[in-house]
Amino acid sequence: MTYLVILLCACCALGAELDTGAGGGGNAREERLRSGLIDAFQNIKQASARGEVDDGLSSDLVGSTLPNSSRSGRREERLDLLSEDDGLTFAEAFGDVEPERRAPTTEKAHNVQHIVKATRQAEKTTTKSNKDVLSKLTESIRNTVNESKQQLRAESNRTDYVGMEHMLRIIDSEILVDQWSDIQRSVRGMCRDEMQGYVNGLLQRRLWAMKMEDASGRYTSMFYWGNNYWTGSAELCQVLNDQHEASPVKLNNKSDGSIMGAWRDDVSISGSGPPFATAFYNVRMLITTDQHELVKTRRTLHLGLCLPRSCTRDQVATIVDAAHSPLLRHKVVAVRSPQHGGYSYMTDPTFQVLLGVCSVVAVLLVAATAYDMQLGRAVRRRRRRAANMAADPNASDLKLDISTLDAITHAAGKSMYNVNNNVAINSNTSEERLTADTASTDGEIKLSVWSELLLSFSMKANVLQILDQSVGADTVPVVHGLRSLSMVWVIFGHTCIVVFKYADNTALRAVLEKSFWFQLIISAVYSVDTFFCLGGMLVSFLYFRTNAKGKLDLLTKGRRTLTSGVLQFLGLIGYRFARLTAPYLFMLGVVEVTMKWFAHNAVFEPPAPDHETCPHYWWRNLLYINTLFPVEQMCMLWSWYLSDDTQFYAVSAILLILATSHFKASVALTGALFLSSLATTGYVSWSSEHVPSGEDPFTQFDKIYDKPWTRLGPYLVGMATGWILFKTNLKIRMNRIWASVGWAVCTATLLFLIFGLYRTQLSVGAAAVYSALSHSLWAACVGWVIVACSTGHGGWVRHLLSAPILYPFSRVTYCAYLVHPVVLRYVAMHLTHPIHLGELLVFVLFLGLTAMSYFFAFLISVAFEAPMVTMLKILAPQKKPHRV
């Protein structure tokens, strides 16, 4: 009401000036009157911005200057403060019209009329000559205000802004204060009241309000370098919230005079907090503009805002939508807020199941390890007695070695606990079975099946098995090196994908794509073809070798061919399902729970909607059929490989069982499947006009990349490689010339596949041929490496790929593949600011994420993978040649 009094005083001054009326001083009085009224209205305008004047009065006296406001057409007319269409003119105020015409035309004009009534006493002394002066004065002020209105309208429509910070404003303190009279109508309740307090704090330059503004995001730089994350500082906003909740005594404490004391007092943790709780909001919006020379396409922008916590995400979206930026047009798509998470672990049934499973497994691990150590001590005592009492000369063969491995072994169909285990143990891997043969039966303790099953959870035994530096007779050592290096390549490719998504200089990728060495990142897609080839090779080689040893007679002897074939097929599928599903199902639950938490509590949006797809479609993953459905419905996107590999395994089981009785028919069917896969891939690529390029190797993901009918070729090539190894018994005589030619062709093909698309534009037809043949050619080269290294023609490559140091990494490859995307997402979702990419930074992130991935893979392998392999071996002592 203070400013209403000012206006009243101005009107009284008008009456006083008119009373002194000399005609010669009219012009001076006009100027003083006009200046005084304009100053009064400016004061009311400022008070309106602070919310201290009634909305109705401020809207009639001040009006809207927003060019894009939905009310712009109606409110621009109200800017003519003295027009007859809205309120009273000066002529009406001083009695120059009939009383009925002096009735206000709008309800909001009542405030102006009230002011005028307060000056009625002065009106009675007005003379006719003064009325002429007032008419001139009215016209002059009306013209002045109209000129001001036109000037404001022109300024609001300006597009010739100088500086990016002016052109790329969306919502900041200035916009919020200037437009608050309109914005406040879009919100209600406590949010509106606390937002009003925030606006007042900005006008009064309160420190806590400045910090809130500082914590909110805005354009800083690199808009044309791909900076779509204007996130501000979620940490500073949280500090303000902590200051709001802190006691005054704590806030008034001085620094302790340490080195950082002055900095603490000067930056963020000094001073009092806002009078309300704060929350950080990340607003995702689409921005466009009519200035196409500045922004040519629609862009997705992420804007961070520090606002009162009482505002819901919907209210924040309404506030941002109601604001009008000078140049950009924006539309809010979604709003995120870690402080408004709404997700609790303990109320999630999936987390409850995971917690129960982890508790049971933890108890089994501890109990089995304790039991293992107790049995070890008992066996060593027996061995000492046997060594001391032995009088037989052959007793010297009983070597006492307390530091040797402890393991469960099988001999003559009996189970026993053997301490002096001097034999090689095939380690549990993602592609092999764990086997054990014993060379001695001395000093053994017979165990029941239940004891053996419990000991399969022994952490001591499982760790030693993973770290074992030896391999079994049925293992091709070069497989370990190929598997380990391919897994590292996969992690490297996925690391680059994630960091590019959450970078503030995403346009750097366009520059890096022109680099020759960047093709190594893009070509990481071929690492999966290496896995397919290795899988087909192992299942074929092990099956033929096991069948040749007669170990399948238990299932086939005395049964019809069809019946025995069905039993073999069910046995193979059941063994693989049991072998893979335990860690896989556990990781499915982990992904669902973690992605739910990230979706509700992280500043950034998750890279995939697993929090929505996993609760509905997890059963497809469990049946390994998720690639038969649209990719939008896929849970754990990287699990497409497991689905395809299991489907290929089922096809290979049919082909291998058929080969034992009808080899030529099996070969013909294999060839037909291979050619049909190539033809299908080429046709899909041609019909969708897919052109492989170095820019995006994952285009047509749902049509070409993950579908089993387009990825079968490398697996069949691997099966052919396994049959060659079995048929030649790992012995192929080849002179040095032919070996050199083979390596030269293989190397040239691999280099062509990796770097061949560099600065190359293929036609649609050539692209279809390339898509059809490239993956199978890669698998053929991997097959050559396996054959050459396994038959003595590998040279230094064989020593590299067969290095024992790679065996432990190879044995946890399956779990590393499952867990590494979760590690990547965990790191990315805990970011509060985008990453500024650089070659060295990406490499350092890759090393750290690889180490973390293998660490967690080791834990999961010890807890889930190794116990399942050991239990399957115990329950199937004949050790059927299942690829697991």
Image (spheres, rainbow, N blue to C red):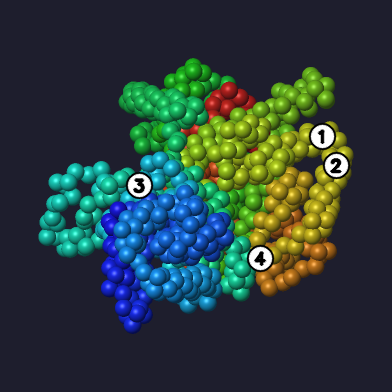
Q: Are marks 2 and 1 in contact (CB under 8 Å)?
A: yes
Q: Can residue 458 be seen by looking at this rendering?
A: no
Q: Are marks 3 and 1 in contact (CB under 8 Å)?
A: no
* Quarter of the rendering containing residue 132: bottom left
How far is the residue under mark 4 from the one under mark 2? Answer: 35 Å
How far is the residue under mark 3 from the one under mark 4? Answer: 51 Å
The residue tagged 3 is 194
How far is the residue under mark 4 from the one under mark 1? Answer: 42 Å
The residue tagged 4 is 694
Q: Residue at x 67, y 38 (%)?
A: 626
* Amino acid on which the number 2 mark rests in the picture: Leu
Q: Nearer the viewer, residue 4 or 618?
A: 4
Q: Nearer the viewer, residue 594 or 413?
A: 594
Q: Which mark is residue 669?
A: 2
Q: Nearer the viewer, residue 617 or 131?
A: 131
Instruction: Where is residue 462? Give x, y as percent.
Output: 46, 35
Neighbour class for label 1 at 10 Å: few (<14), some, many (≥20)? Answer: some
